[in-house]
Each structure stands twice: as structure tokens, then as C-alpha cells.
Amino acid sequence: MQYPDNGGYMIAAYVVAAVVVLVYAVSLFVRIRRLQRP
Amino acid sequence: MSREKAEALARRGTVLTAVALLALAGVYLRALLFTPIERFQGPAQKIFYVHAPAAWSGLLAFAVTGLLSVLYLWLRDRKVDLVAAASAEVGLAFSVIMLTTGPIWAKPIWGTWWTWDARLTSTLFIFLLFVGYQVLRGAIADPETRARFSAVIGVLGLVLVPFIHMTVYLFRTLHPDPVVMKPGAPSLPGEMQVTLFTSLGVFTLLYLGFLAQRYALAVLRDLKDEEAGRAVS
Amino acid sequence: MGDGLRAAWAIAGKDLAIEWRTKTALVSSVAFAVLVLAVLYFARDPTAVGAVDVAPGALWVTFTFAAMIGLNRAFLLERENRALDGILLAPVSPRAVFFGKLAANLVFVGTVELVSLPLFVLFYDVPIVRGLPALLGVTAMATVAFVAVGTLLSSMVVRTRFAELMLPLLLLPFLVPPVVGAVQATARILAERPLSEVQGWLKLLAAFDIVFVTISTLLFEATLEE
């Protein structure tokens, strides 16, 4: 191996970040939608 | 703000966020597949392309909340409070990303889950300030009092963070870490720099999109409360 | 100016007189101090960790909790007697009100600290005589720091739900610079190092004091308006 075998950490971090971003984005979208429904 | 304007802002914000999310997917692809792996730190080093920009967005959000808090105490304009609060909530989300990716990055790179370095520690306490800010807002019914008290916390927080930074810095210089602490942004080769700066741009865009949406949400809520009040009376 | 000072004095006096009548908070704080000192003493491997290493941290956890109890007590008093309304009706400047409350809180916390200190020396057997003035100075600086911010925060929190939970949550980040500075300075003082070694921390404490007492005074008015 040329480099340390820590790809698992990389995947974990990228997944966690994506999840937080998406959850927050969806929460905003849903909350706005709820207020727009007449 | 009229309902039409608020809904227009919400729409624009949603579009901006959607664009930023697509761009984020692009950054992910570039970082994971098309950016070289750092030889000594391995793939885990790539977490940096997400961790650092999230920290930047969190700090930006905090600065905005802090500065708008000062502005609110001067102008007492409700809109200023709503933007400050919107920025605080968005900042909370970015702080969570920073505080979760931080340990996941630190463990393989520095061998420990948490390093009490100036940046991580400051962000931890910014996070706690944000949490306190939200809790305080939730506990006050009157909008004017809520705005005023939030602004006080905002200003206090703004003044505090440099002191926390200083505290950690003092601690570090008097107690040098046995592990050689590489600064967050070492001189990166060209390819990596491009990825980093692209990611910074995307995260800033994401902040703006979220901010617009969250502010529009606050205004819409306000309008709804007003309408409900009128309906009841 | 004289009016303000007199008013502040009166407010502080009333606050302390009420506390002195029952002394509940004072007694609980001291009891708590003994508990904390004892637990932290026993929570270590005595063959590996000397009492003197744990001492500064133990002392400052004790002092910080004393401050929390003191601040809590101060606003519970306000709430129960709706005293805040009474103070607002009187023609007293907000600055005077703030200094009055701050003074009362400082006297309370200071008293607990002065009582805890001999207990601390007793339990941890630390050499305190030569460093006493420095230690008292550091203690005074750090205490002023977090009691000033705490007094401001408690005036906001008193009118909210879950006030007792809210105060520690909001105050916590503001404890970091003064308490870390105080612990570091205390450790050096107890180790009988020359004061020049703690210069950095002393400057941090002093700067924090100046900045936060000023800003708390200025912001206090914003927590009072109708």
C-alpha cells in the first residue's frame, strides 16, 4: 500500500455531511411547503 | 414584507439551495474520484474538503448573527432579528457537520478523536452558543422581548469567540502538543487547492440558499400568526 | 453619580440581607464545595496522580458551582417577590441596578470562595502561604468575569420558562476563558513558579474582565425595557 488504509473514515465523513445537509434542506422545504398550502 | 414577496423569496431561496446541492454533488465527485490521494495521510485527508468549508460556513453564519445582533440593538428592526435568527439556525446545521466530520478526520490523521485546537474548540462553543440561542428563543413568547434577548446573546457571543480562540492558543503555545500539529490548510498542490476552493464556494452558496429559505420561512410564519390573530378577533 | 452609587448599594444590601436571614444558599454552596473537593480527591489513583495535580481543577470546579448556585439564588429571589417590578418603578438608572446586583452576587460567591479555600488547603495539603496574594488576585479576576456575565444572563433568563436550566446552558461558553485562565494560573501559583510564567493568563483574565464587565453593563439596559 502506498498510503494508509483509512478510506472508511473518508466515506463515513462524506456520508454524515451529506445526510446533515440533505436532512436540513428537506426540513426547510417541508416547513415552507406547510405554510404555503392555503 | 408582503406574502407575495415572502413566497418569491422562498422560491428563489429554494432554487439557490437546489443549485448549491447539485454543485455539492459535483464537489463530492471531484473530491472523491478526481482529486489525488495524499500519500502520507491517505484517503481520509479528503475529509478536509468537506470539513473546512463547513467550518467556514458555520463561522460565516455566526458572524452574520453576531453583527446583525449589534444592528438589531441599534435599529430595533424586526427584520434584522429574523435574519439573525435564520443565520443562527443555518449555522447550527453547519456546525453539526463540522463537529461530526472533525473527529472522523482527526482519528485517522492525528490518532485521537478530539484535539482541543483553537478551531475545533471555538466551533464547539459557537455550537453551544447557537443551541442556547435557539433554546432561549423557544422559551420567550413575546416577539419583541425574544428579539432583544437573542440580540444580547448574539453580541456577547461575538465578543466571546476571540477570547476562546486566545485561550486555546495560549494553552497550545505554553503546552506544545507532542504530536506535530499541522495547520488546517497546509500548502496544497494545485489540484487539491482547486477542489478546496470550489468546495468553499459551494458551501457559501449553500449557506446563502439556506439563509434565504429560512428567512422566508420566518416571515411566512409571522404573516400566518398575524392573519390568525386577525381571524380570531 | 452619588445617587447611582447609593441606589446600587441599597439594592445590594437588600439582596444580601434577604440571603443572610435564611443562609440556605450559602450553606448549600459550602456543603457542595466539600462534596466536590472530596469526590475529586478520591476520583484518582493516588499512586499515579498527586493531590497537587488535581488541586487547581478541583478548586475551580468548586468555585464555578458556587457561582452558579449564587446566581440561581439571586434570581429565584427576584421571581418569588416580583421584586424586579418594584425596582423598575423606582427612578434608578439601569447601571445602578446592574452594579447593585453584581455586587450582591460577588459578595455571595466571594464568601463561598473564602470559606472553601481553607477547606481546600486542608484536604489537598497545598502550599498556599507564599502564593496567597496572587491566588486571591486570580480568584477575584476570574470570579468578577463569570459573575458579571452571569448577572446579565440571569436578568434575561428569570422571565423565561425553564430558567434554572437555561442559565447554565447560556453561561457555559463564557466560563471557558476565565476558568481555564484561572486554573492554569492557580496551578503555577501552587507549584510556586515565578509569576512571570503566568503573565499570559493574567493578561487574558484582565482583558476578559474589562471587556465583559463593560459590555454586560451596557447590555443590561436592553434586558430591562418594557
Image (tube, coloured by chain):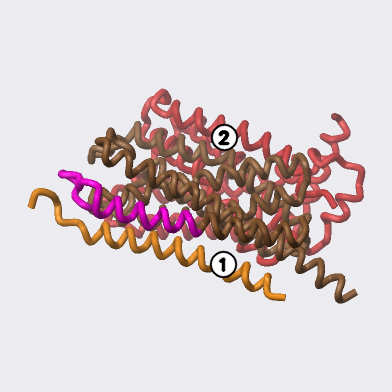
Left or right placement of residue B173 versus residue C174 in this view? left
Q: In whole angstroms, how far apart are the C-alphas of marks 1 and 2?
A: 42 Å
- Give how far across and how far down residue A34 sits, in percent: 64, 73
Decide whether residue C180 is among the magenta residues.
no
Task: Please report the bounds of the magenta region as a residue range.
Answer: B18-43
Q: Which residue is mark 2?
A: C208
Specify whether residue C9 is in view.
no
Q: Which mark is residue A29?
A: 1
Residue at 45%, 33% (x, y): give it.
C129
- Give how far across and how far down residue C131 sits, in percent: 45, 31
Q: Observer-nearest residue: C54 or B206?
A: B206
The part of the image, by quadrant, that contains residue B160 is top right
The quadrant of the picture occupied by the N terminus of chain C is top right
Q: Amino acid at mark 2?
A: Phe
Q: Observer-nearest residue: B173 or B21?
A: B21
Q: Tell me the SS state at disc 2.
A: helix
Residue at 39%, 59% (x, y): give it.
A17
| Residue with the most extreme top position | C196
What letter labels the chain drawn in brown?
Answer: B
| Chain letter behind tag 1 | A
Q: Tell me the SS state at disc 1.
A: helix
| Residue with the most extreme left position | A1
What letter labels the chain drawn in red?
Answer: C
